[in-house]
Amino acid sequence: MSVAAKTAADMAAHWDGRAHLFEAAASHHRHRADWRQVLAAATGLGPLDVVDLGCGTGACAILLAGLGHRVTGIDGSAAMLAEARRAAARDGLQIDFRHSDMDRCALPDACTDLVSLRNVLWTLAHPAAALQLALRLLRPGGRVLLSDGLWRRSPDARLGALGPHLPHACGVTRAEARRWLAEAGFGDVAEWQNRFAEHPYDGMYDEPATPIAFFVLTARVGA
Ligand SMILES: C[S@@+](CC[C@H](N)C(=O)[O-])C[C@H]1O[C@@H](n2cnc3c(N)ncnc32)[C@H](O)[C@@H]1O
């Protein structure tokens, strides 16, 4: 099954329109040091080959490359990638950013040690299929890193006609992610969200008093 065959083009247009806002608004800047130490703990000693699916403006890819990993970032939005390339150059990091719908990415089978998807599962029509894609890309013993959260109570109106096609437009829970991992045959699941010194996100977008329930999970192929 494809990850997002019917929605990928509209999703790319959505992010093309938001790229200039995303970087400025993203909480990953304020909590960069925390993210760095959580990703360091979660990925362990490298260097690993990493494919960051839905890399967006490169925040996660850049942290992973800064830890010494060899990172390829895939994203469907040219404008998000333009921000990512600028940010990587500013930090003096070599990252192979590729403009592609992840369903069509031309990466070969068993090409990487780690596949990361941070805050991407909620944008997909079939998020569980992203784990099948990860399985195809991972070498034996490789790992997937998933991070996402329950972002809002009602879908973002800015998604327009896309909203009804996204079953997780409000976000993804840790239980859902763990279920998808188990169904895809991943094992050795580890949780990292409790390692943050401070909660890295503000409250839910449409219910600011409620902290966003987020997760950072790793899991291993066939373990
Ligand atoms: C919320 S942003 C997250 C960006 C980044 N991973 C981060 O943590 O900052 C979601 C990104 O996923 C990308 N994306 C969504 N669906 C995609 C698809 N089917 N193929 C490639 N990229 C996709 C979007 O273009 C967007 O840049």
Image (tube, rainbow, N blue to C red):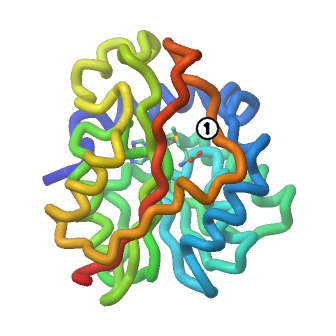
Q: Amino acid at mark 1?
A: Ala
- Residue 124 horizontal side relative to residue 199, left or right: left
* Residue 150 visible from this viewpoint: yes
Q: Nearer the viewer, residue 212 or 172?
A: 212
Q: Quadrant of the C terminus?
A: bottom left
Residue 74, percent across and down? 49, 57
Q: Nearer the viewer, residue 29 or 132?
A: 29
- Residue 177 horizontal side relative to residue 14, left or right: left
**Looking at the image, is 18 positioned above or below residue 60?**
above
Question: Which residue is found at the position 22% from the left and 82% from the top?
Answer: 222
Q: Nearer the viewer, residue 22 or 20?
A: 22
Q: Residues within 10 Å of mark 1 (few under 14, many from 20)?
A: many
Question: Which residue is found at the position 27% from the left and 64% from the top?
Answer: 133
Question: Which residue is found at the position 43% from the left and 61% from the top?
Answer: 217
Q: Which residue is mark 1?
A: 79
Judged from the image, the secondary structure of the residue bearing numbered disc 1 is: helix
Residue 2, percent across and down? 19, 51
